[in-house]
Image (cartoon, coloured by chain):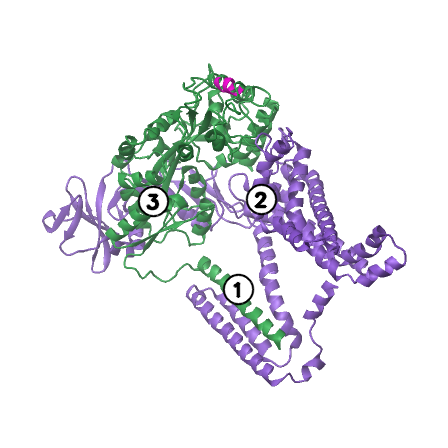
Chain colours: A green, B purple
Amino acid sequence: MRIRTAGVVAAVSMVALVVAGCGDSSTKSGGTGTPSKAAGGTLVIWADDQRTAALKPFADKFGKDNGVTVQVQAISKDLQTNFVTASQSGKGPDIVVGAHDWIGNMVQNGAIDPVQLTDAQKSGFADIALKAVTFNGQVYGVPYAIENLALIRNTDLAPNAPSTMDDLVAAGTALKTAGKVTNIMSLQVSQTGDAYHIYPLFTSGGGYLFGTKANGDYDPADLGVDKPASVAAFQKIAAFGEKGSGALTRSVTGDNAIPTFTGGKAAFLISGPWAIPDIKKAGLHYDITPVPGFAGGKAAQPFVGVQAFYVASKGKNKALAQEFVTNYLTKPDLQVALYQANPRPPALTTALNQVKASDPDLQKFMDAGKGGAVLPAIPQMAAIWDPFGKAEAAIIGGADVPSTLAAAAKTITDQINK
Amino acid sequence: MAVERNGAEVTPPRPAADRTPPPPGARLAGQAGKTLLLGLVAALAVWGAFPLVSAHAWPALGALAVVTALIFSVYLSKRRIPLKYLLPGTLLLIAFQVIPVVYTASTALTNFGDGHRGSKQDAVVAIQGASVRQVPGSTEYGLTVATRGGTLVFLLADPSGGTFVGDAKGLRSLDPSSVTVSGGRITSASGYSVLNLGEANARGAEVTALSVPTPDGAIRANGLTRAFDGKASQAYDAGCDCVRDTSTGHVWRADNANGSFVDSDGQKLPQGWRVNVGLRNFGRVLTDSRISGPFLRTLVWNMAFAVLTVLAQFALGLLCALAMHSPRVRGRSVYRALMVLPYAMPSFAMLLVWTDMFNQDFGLINKLFSLNVDWLGQPWTARAAVILVQLWLGYPYMFLVSTGALQAIPKDLQEAAEVDGASAWGRFRQVTLPLLLVALSPLLISSFAYNFNNFNAIRLTTEGGPFPPTDSSVGATDLLITYTYRVAFGGQGAQFGFAAALSLYIFAIVAIISAISFRRTRRQEEVYS
């Protein structure tokens, strides 16, 4: 009898399982659902953990003003993937918040709609921010923050900003020889490389990833990874690598790059606004300057990334979502609040001006990003990161430059053309 | 033997035992429990049926009805004793094993992935929606959503003070004296009832769908307070099954075999759709030089990784278990608790900590031993490192199961061997180990299968590296699963169809190896039992 009861228990859980499984498929096939009880419906926003907290008060206010309910939901992991998948099955949010280089993938999956901004609204944004959210000639998101790399230096150890990379390495080497630091500089490389962080040096040496079309968009057909200019750039990078001066080393990774600097083990750090809270916590005296280029080389261009709000194509409250994104987000208050939650320079010029006075770092980061390259949002960029990063790591480890880059370019082309 | 004793518990009692009536108390409790649980089944079935009905998911509803009916007929009947035992297990097997495998196999036959997720209809809607642009030089309107006789209309105010009403028929002027305009928007108009934002959003789908035709395009809502004169520059034409650019006349024809719109130069529109591609994904696994090239090399290392990991874990675990088994060791429970610690820690975190410890400049291992080894930067040290990490993570499990199996070996066998004059090593080699292996072989095989596909062990430590400079697609520590993951997801977004085909290949490899091992184990069992 006991065993028989156990069988029924299992059967019950089985039915529960079938129900759960079917429930899933039901939303996929139907998606009709019951209409929301709230008078004006519920606007759902997906954002990462930090931004969720900053958005809540504004979302509540927007909801109260307009007689709707606004829910801000934190998606702490793989926000983009989750959004695309949920959107496909009709269970996605109305608005999603994320980096601009997601646009290409979200568009090819039909997950977001273009936003229509008036010329007056457009002119309120920093040019580069607007350029970043433009894809195939359409504006797809409303930007709220800009981020890029800069050189952060410990002013106690290195009082003067180096004007070239060569000066920086010389100063760092002197400090290392004097035993004041253990690393000449802290730039994350790791065993698998980091295309984002090496990009300023890559461009200073003359390298390029994609050519640009006549309209300024990146051209995936023109891959620059193994072109002579890129080879020359990596030869300069190799001179600072493990077989050269040792300024760049694979043992510096994304996990230890900032702690190495805050722990006083390196006088120079190449990183972004996200490093500042840790540096302040460590109580260091620091200054922020543009990433220097090689002596006699071009200017070092960091990638400029933009955080933006997007309107979901398959949201249930699209009109309200457009209202929130195009008419509410283009006002400075929310952008200032988002800055306070996570100090990255606001994309709206008036918001930047409001917070600039109390935070001099912002202008310095903006200056460092001047002339930077917009992080490509084309889907082909996804094929770059991994092979390019690994080629970088290999070259910093001492591998032959032309053959390594040729192999990386072949891998990238194979992936783009598949 | 532990395994056999365990097995006896699930052996169904013979029908003869069923005929002897159980004590009345137990019978009553059993009936009550059965009623309750079957009631719960019915309740869950009804609860699950409602959303299915409202979503018109008839096949799912049918499955639900059949499963529920089956459960009731089996457990209400006095006969069908074997089925009473088989049914729950079978249903779980179908839910957790058969359905995922069938789903994976069916996905492998499609091009499902980023850019090919939805239907062709979805793609067309996305293409047309994404091509809507504001007509150059056109007016921006302040929008007020209103109704007239229940029909939704747009009340529009242009910056120069003109007021209009727009509906699906077109745009008409509104007499300025009959409307109130404030802040660039109409706030009231005689004959129309103005909706506030909440009310307008409640009819949001209608607002989004309404387009007011104009000579150049159509006025659409942009949010709920603004409207613009926009035009879709790309439109689908069912006649030619193509997408045409309305201004340039450029044409992208549907390629229904690949699920994309392609122009004459071979350029695709980004938005594609999901189509059946037959066995193409399976063929691609064999022909893709990035996979077939390094396949054998990776397979050899993959086998070595799984075998060495299991053997090392088992050897160390067994050694510890033997040491702890001796009654002469004092404080055995303390030692045992300490030894299980690595098993109790979250392996995700531990893998990351170990990766840090192997760092050449900052890592604990080089500092502790005053070494300067680039552990994760050279093929052989990296391989040794990942196996070492797996050894540390996995030996407590082997220790636990060996301890259990050791305690189940009858003492008299040992004593008999001792009386026969066997040495300690001989007793272990001839008596203990064979008996242990009979019990533990299935565990070793499943552990092998697990480690064969131990994605985290590589992904969270070396990420497959170090990579030869000339080939970034496969590294020295890559397993088949980590390297196929990179091929399937490392490029332009996820390719689920291709990934499914790859995983079926890996599934076949592991299944064949396991089947062979189990067959050999059975032979061994026959010898020793």
The quadrant in which the N terminus of chain B is found is bottom right
Q: Chain of mark 1?
A: A
Q: In terms of depth relative to the viewer, which is nearer, A59 or B351?
A: B351
Asked whether, in this view, residue A127 is left or right of residue B253, the answer is left
Q: Which mark is residue A54?
A: 3
Picture coordinates of residue B150 (x, y %)? 23, 60
Q: Which residue is mark 1?
A: A17
Name the mark nearer the viewer: 3 or 1.
3
Q: CA distance from mark 3 to mark 1?
A: 38 Å
Helix, strand or loop at disc 1? helix
Helix, strand or loop at disc 2? helix
Q: Residue at x 17, y 48 (%)?
A: B186
Picture coordinates of residue A357 (x, y %)? 28, 30
Magenta residue check for A174: yes
Q: In terms of depth relative to the viewer, which is nearer, A197 or B415?
A: B415
Q: Residue at x 47, y 29 (%)?
A: A261
Residue B486 drawn above or below residue B52:
above
Q: CA distance from mark 2 to mark 3?
A: 33 Å
Q: Amino acid at mark 1?
A: Leu
